[in-house]
Image: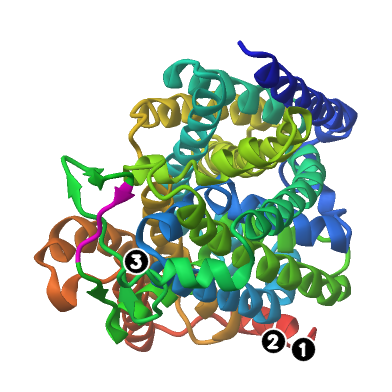
């Protein structure tokens, strides 16, 4: 290993050591009971809630996946995705955050999303509990895999190690860290990681603009690529066997493609996913005082706006600076790495690289913990062994975490995986499965348990059906699977609720209590 790489590695090891220290600090508190381990005893402050929600949400795809999309195909796909995510973030904090915080307490002090759904509808037969737990495990396993892919790509690109070895090593670290500290450690490290992520993005952005000759020069050079800097057009790299063709050092592009209004709506629909993201909703539930969510919303919104804008800009600037350096879509997701290692002295580049590692760890530990708790708290204790003690739940959480991580590692074995595509599928899964049910549960007194079950099954199944069977037909059907799945789930919830027995008086009174809390 070269001296420069050693310095980068040292900086990243220092960062990892700090993360481990945080985990050990919270280990004793986390292991006192399952509520502390799974939701931190509802003790998060507004800053930790805000930064933790955004860092665990955005993950490594913010620093690799989104810049990669901009580098590969230009502004349109990346910027409309970013706009959808920003709007979705704001609306989720504005409308959902306080309501789910209050409702989860009123609904028998629910500490997981499956618990909330089950308690909200006063289930005797735990169908909602079981279904939501299973879907969380499925989609978070895919999500965790995307984090492991990010770690593998990071270390194999930086140090030349084998991808598979680095992916496994990174996954094992995340597993060990999550086992030790639980939700409190994850939230505290998310706060630190959110700060590192935004600093890394801003520094690389401004240094990149300077290296490219200023904003005007970036715009002028980008416009030389057909469709690259258009909101309603898209660049189309000329590829052979998945590799972009190059002549005399100049990468070749086909004529610009059109980016229709339907494509814009489809891409903006990423924002709908927020209403069903368990790792974000759980942060809302864990804040110590619902009145502090207003400050959290402001912090999160500003962080999100700056981070998304910087990530898209880095991809555009990267194509100007390194037009022929990354010639496949999978390789394009390394543009942030390339810029950081090229711009900075090794020790500082290592700090910037820690931003990617930070993003990945902050997300992967959230995914694993929530998926494992869905198994232990909701399935194991809620359905199979209702007499299970708190110690049994903690033990089963750790066992489930290891098994789920192992499956995620198996999915992540392919080093040609495109992080953005892996994340987009899991995002659609959560958004369509839980988003409509969550909104109806929080804001409709008349929604029924049968409607919630039908909507949840419809949303989850349609994500697979649309992605695998409908979307390949192309044309007007080639839209992001989240949008049709979300809308169809809403329609099904409404129709089934209108045609089934209305909720009990107890359920409606509980709804009114929460509504009157503001």
User: Can residue 254 be seen by looking at this rendering?
Assistant: yes
Is residue 396 placed above or below 375 in the rendered structure?
above
Q: Position of residue 357 (x, y in %)?
A: 65, 36
Query: Is label 1 or label 3 in front?
Result: 3
Q: Which residues are magenta?
A: 250-254
Q: Which residue is mark 3?
A: 225
Q: Measured along the vertical axis of the image, is residue 208 above or below residue 507?
A: above
Quadrant location of the N terminus?
A: top right
Crowding at mark 3 (Cα within 10 Å: few <14, some 14-19, many 20+):
many
Which residue is under mark 1? Answer: 516
Rendered image: mark on residue 389: none
Q: Nearer the viewer, residue 510 or 20?
A: 20
Tag 2 near tag 1, CB within 8 Å = yes
Q: What residue appears at the point 59 percent right and 48 percent down from the top-left corner?
A: 59
- Name the quarter where the C terminus is drawn: bottom right
- The quarter of the displayed image where residue 410 is located: top left
Could you tell which of marks 2 and 3 lies nearer the N-terminus?
3
Q: Nearer the viewer, residue 112 or 302?
A: 302
Q: Residue at x 68, y 79 (%)?
A: 510
Which badge, 1 or 3, comes first in the chain's sequence?
3
Q: Is residue 255 magenta?
A: no
Question: Which residue corresponds to mark 2?
Answer: 512
301 or 35, nearer to the observer: 301
């Amino acid at each position: 290993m070269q001296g420069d790489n050693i310095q980068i590695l040292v900086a990243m090891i220092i960062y990892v050591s700090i993360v481990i220290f945080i985990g050990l600090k919270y280990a004793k508190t986390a292991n006192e009971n399952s509520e502390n381990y799974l939701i931190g005893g509802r003790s998060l402050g507004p800053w930790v809630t805000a930064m933790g929600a955004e860092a665990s949400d955005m993950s490594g795809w913010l620093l690799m996946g989104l810049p990669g999309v901009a580098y590969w195909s230009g502004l349109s796909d990346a910027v409309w995705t970013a706009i959808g995510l920003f709007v979705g973030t704001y609306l989720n904090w504005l409308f959902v955050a306080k309501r789910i915080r209050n409702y989860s307490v009123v609904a028998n002090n629910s500490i997981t999303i499956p618990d909330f759904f089950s308690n909200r509808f006063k289930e005797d037969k735990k169908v909602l509990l079981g279904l939501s737990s299973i879907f969380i495990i499925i989609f978070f396993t895919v999500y965790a895999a995307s984090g492991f892919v990010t770690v593998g790509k990071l270390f194999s690109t930086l140090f030349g190690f084998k991808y598979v070895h680095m992916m496994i090593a990174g996954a094992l670290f995340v597993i060990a860290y999550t086992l030790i500290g639980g939700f409190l450690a994850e939230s505290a490290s998310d706060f630190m990681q959110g700060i590192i992520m935004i600093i890394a993005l801003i520094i690389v952005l401004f240094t990149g603009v300077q290296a490219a000759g200023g904003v005007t020069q970036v715009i002028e050079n980008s416009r030389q690529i057909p469709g690259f800097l258009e909101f309603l057009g898209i660049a189309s790299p000329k590829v052979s066997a998945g590799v972009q063709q190059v002549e005399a050092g100049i990468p070749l592009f086909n004529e610009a493609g059109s980016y229709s209004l339907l494509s814009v709506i489809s891409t903006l629909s990423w924002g709908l996913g927020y209403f069903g993201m368990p790792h974000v909703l759980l942060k809302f539930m864990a804040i110590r005082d619902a009145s502090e969510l207003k400050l959290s919303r402001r912090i999160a919104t500003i962080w999100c706006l700056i981070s998304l804008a910087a990530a898209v800009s880095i991809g555009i600037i990267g194509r100007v600076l390194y037009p022929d350096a990354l010639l496949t879509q999978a390789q394009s997701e390394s543009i942030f790495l390339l810029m950081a290692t090229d711009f900075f002295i090794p020790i500082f580049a290592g700090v910037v690289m820690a931003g990617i590692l930070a993003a990945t760890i902050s997300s992967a530990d959230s995914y694993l913990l929530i998926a494992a708790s869905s198994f232990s708290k909701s399935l194991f204790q809620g359905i199979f062994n209702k007499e299970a003690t708190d110690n049994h739940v903690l033990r089963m959480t750790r066992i489930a975490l290891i098994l789920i991580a192992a499956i995620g590692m198996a999915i992540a074995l392919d080093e040609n995986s495109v992080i953005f595509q892996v994340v987009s599928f899991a995002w659609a899964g959560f958004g369509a499965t839980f988003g409509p049910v969550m909104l109806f549960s929080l804001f409709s007194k008349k929604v029924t348990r049968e409607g919630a079950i039908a909507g949840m099954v419809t949303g989850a199944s349609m994500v697979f059906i649309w992605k695998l069977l409908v979307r390949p037909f192309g044309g007007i059907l080639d839209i992001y699977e989240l949008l049709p799945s979300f809308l169809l789930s809403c329609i099904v919830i409404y129709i089934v609720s209108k045609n089934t027995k209305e909720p009990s008086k107890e359920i409606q009174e509980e709804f009114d209590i929460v509504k009157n809390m503001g």
